Image (cartoon, grey):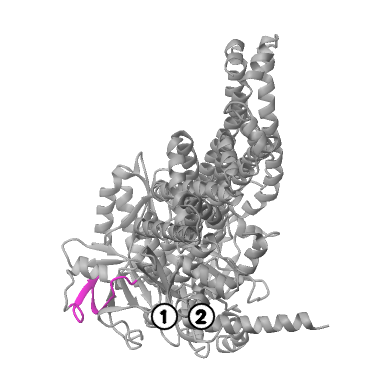
Amino acid sequence: MMRPWSRLKGTARNLLRKSHVENQLDEEVRAYVEMSADERIAAGTSPSEARRTVLAESGGIEQVKQAVRDRRAGAGIELFWQDVRFGLRQLAQNPGFTLSAIAALSLGIGANTAIFSVVNTVLLKPLTYPDADRMVNFLAPSVEIASDLHNIPEFHFLQRQTNLFKDVAAFDNAGPGFNLTGGSRPEQVNGIHVTEGYFRIYGAPVALGRTFTPQDDSPHGGNVVVLSYALWQRKFAGDPAIAGKSISLGNQPYTVVGVTGKDFVGGVDADLWLPFQFDPASTDFNVAYFVTGLLQPGVTIAQANAALAAATPEYLREYPKSWDPHFRIGPLFDSIIGDARNSLLLMLGAVGLVLLISCANVANLLLVRATVRKREFAIRSALGAARARIVRQLLTESVLLSLAGGALGTAIGFVGMRALLAVSPAGLPRIGENGAAIGIDWRVLAFTLGVSLLTGILFGLFPAFSASRSDLSSTLKESGNRSSTGFHEGKARSLLVVSEISLALVLVIGASLLIRTFIALHEVGPGFDARNVLTMEMSLNGPRYQHTAGLAQLLHDGRNRLNALPRVELAAAGFWRPIDVEDGTGFHITGRPVDKDCCGSKWMSITPGYLNLFRIPVLRGRDFNDDDNAGAPRVALINEAFARKYFPHQDPIGQHIDHGQEGGQRGIETIVGIVADFHDGGLARSADAMMIVPIPQVSDEYNAAYANIQPLFWMVRTHGDPHQAIPAIAEQLRIASGGFPVAHIRTMDEIMGHSTARQSFQMLLLTIFGVVALLLAAIGIYGLMAYSVARRTQEMGIRIALGADRSVIRNLVVWQGMRLALVGVVAGIAAAFGLTRLLSTLLFGVKPWDPTVFLVAPPILAAVALLAVWVPAARASRVDPVLALRAE
Amino acid sequence: MNSKQANLLQGTLDLLVLRALAPGELHGLGVSRRIEQITKGTILVKPGSLFPALHRMEEAGWLTSFWSESENNRRAKFYRLTKAGKRQLDVETEQWTTVALAMTNALKAT
């Protein structure tokens, strides 16, 4: 048996002490020859004759030494190192070739690294929670609600399924925000409500004190708060005795029970956490809570879903007034990444095409070079180099190229992705602020290395084989150093150019479809006018806003103060912005048969002026006014979608909507008007059925629940630039609210931009890919034609000398190039027909086989190709026959 | 060396070298001569095969080498079996015997 250790030692010695090893080898073989000769001399041969015979019999000293070298340990490494050094010399001798190859490769590999670094961050990096694989999210229990929201009875029921879940916790999404008061300047901080199990599920580390106990989270648990490490450091200077101290939130004292560990991020970013303190006997069916859970070890998601379905009748017996919920769970990871997977994988596919085009380009360059180096290879073969040895040499060169391209590409890709994200926030989960979480880790590096090696082999293999296949004698016989392009290489190069063009066309068509999507999204009237509208958020903490009366007073006072400002055209408030309404409600239409599962719609509460401010027209009936207050009959507006859905053959105005029991009173509203549809769920979604009510008529319980989970949005339409009005507006609202700040002040335009961030990002990426592909394809076809013209200079010269018209020569070359381009375009159209279907989920307002795109993109590509072909064609037609003929 | 002999040698050269060195240390030419002697002149190992084999076996840890004076006062590199080399000789001898016996039986069979 070979002993690996002694072999390793041998390898190290052979490589590291090379001259010593070589000297010894030389001495050893010489001694052999001398001793052999001695034997023969002793037997009577003359010294010179003896030496000659020995040398002849042994096959020569150098040959013996080479035989030892070839077999000894580390020979492969040595050979490889030789190839590398030779390859580097070769590349350094042709800086033009080397640089253009590295440029093409670094573009291709860089784009791939960039996209992969995003894919890695979003899809591949595991969640950092200790039990991440058992963490689940409870999905929407009804199709009537857009988000995965639940109500308190549902949460309590789920919490009792202890055979399935180790822990179940509720939390609110963005939270209402909290006014951290008590200092000189109140500040709105990001706080959310959670149930006590939340910290256990997320495996939250504790820096100080403790997280919530079940006692803290009970209805009489008192005012307690857990701080985040960052807030503790920032506002309380890391006070080591903070646990047990009191801080002021919305002018109320709260006792700090603990501080979470430094890097803890739960389901939602937060500065502090408050306990929900749900009433265990609650029958409040308002859906407002996200629910997350930790599966018992060994329970699968499918099992848990089946068990939940089986347990639902039990829930309905307990809460007969509830709707029929469809309890479902999914992996937390899936909920976090949402629909980002599909779009990212498509981008990865698209960028893969760019890389293929780069490869084709470099393969083409290598083919040209291989033609030039044909004699070199022929001579090496003649001297006994095996074909495998030449292929290996050429592959080493191409892998060197691709590694250089990969190294440069990693830098380009990383910087490029950062720059792109700074311009266009991707709207992707897990990537942090402007993509701060996207970085280079071992996965990205391994990916880039793998891609580089693979590319090097891919584009190197073909030229290497074609070069090593050359026919020795004919190559060597050819005169001068100009060997002609063989038929095979010519065909191969044309094939590469054709595939480059077809791939580029696929990308250009894809990019055009996304551009059309982007335009379509921006042409969609959102159904409201966002210009010159400022939105800001206010946290309604404290007992004053637990009653509708207090809230109505604030709204009334605030609106009056804002409307009195000179820059303000109109002010209003609401618990949602018109672009992202998420709440919904179930109801019953009075006079119809009771059907528990019938009716649901989106639901939003606003102040008078809101519709006017956004220029949302009231089509029939009337808008709200200040008389629609707590004492007046309850009224509601519906949108067109609502009217179509629930009153297709009936006039909705004057009909009654019954929400069932709301706290102490029965919630019945009369429909007083129909408003035009607006995009309440984002621009890419058409309007859902929605009902709108005035905040002053909403029940105390409902308004209090809202104040506890959501900030109030103030909206102001200004004369001219909204930004200049901010200080005055903030000041007036602070006075009206009794000292509360406003936060997240943004123009409605910014918010609209945010809602199409993902589409903008995809469009930008694919457009960049399309342009790069177009450039590479143009360079590819230019290179091929320029090379072919250069080779045929003599032929052109003869033709011109014989009287051929120069335009005929030009057209000959143009036609030759354009024939390839057209074949590529046709192949590209066919491929695009097949591939654009994959894009359909990313498209909006345009079909995957949109005729405009399919009619416009091919001529663009053909035009670029024509431009690229024209230059060498024009050069061919300008050939001076005398010079051309003398050149040989 | 013709190709027939090369084929013969490929499987047996290692064993022959080990066997040649079993009685004691030898330099390259000595190994060659000893093999010639113990195979009764049937197998002549040429330096182009011998030296790569010696170096390879030394790297494998079966042989160890040292420089010394030859019988007629030339400086030469001598090889000697290591413990591992002796074990290897036993293993290969046994393998060879088994195979040789099997082959002989096979060829005798009718």
Label 2 – label 1 distance at C-alpha: 61 Å
Image x and y of residue A565, in percent = 29, 46
Q: Amino acid at mark 1?
A: Ile
Q: Amino acid at mark 2?
A: Gln
Which residue is under mark 1? Answer: A201
Instruction: Using the rendered view, name the quadrant where residue A359 is placed.
Output: top right
Q: Is residue A27 left or right of residue A2?
A: left
Q: Is residue A790 left or right of residue A693?
A: right
Instruction: Using the rendered view, name the quadrant where residue A651 is placed.
Output: bottom right
Which residue lies most toward the bottom here?
A163
Instruction: Tell me the magenta residue range.
Output: A242-264
Contact? badges 2 and 1 (CB < 8 Å): no
Image x and y of residue A102, in percent = 46, 42
Image x and y of residue A413, in percent = 43, 49
Which residue is drawn at the image coordinates 50% and 46% (left, top)?
A397
The circle on residue B88 is: 2
Which element type, helix, strand or loop, lies under badge 1? Answer: helix
Quarter holding the C terminus of chain A is top right
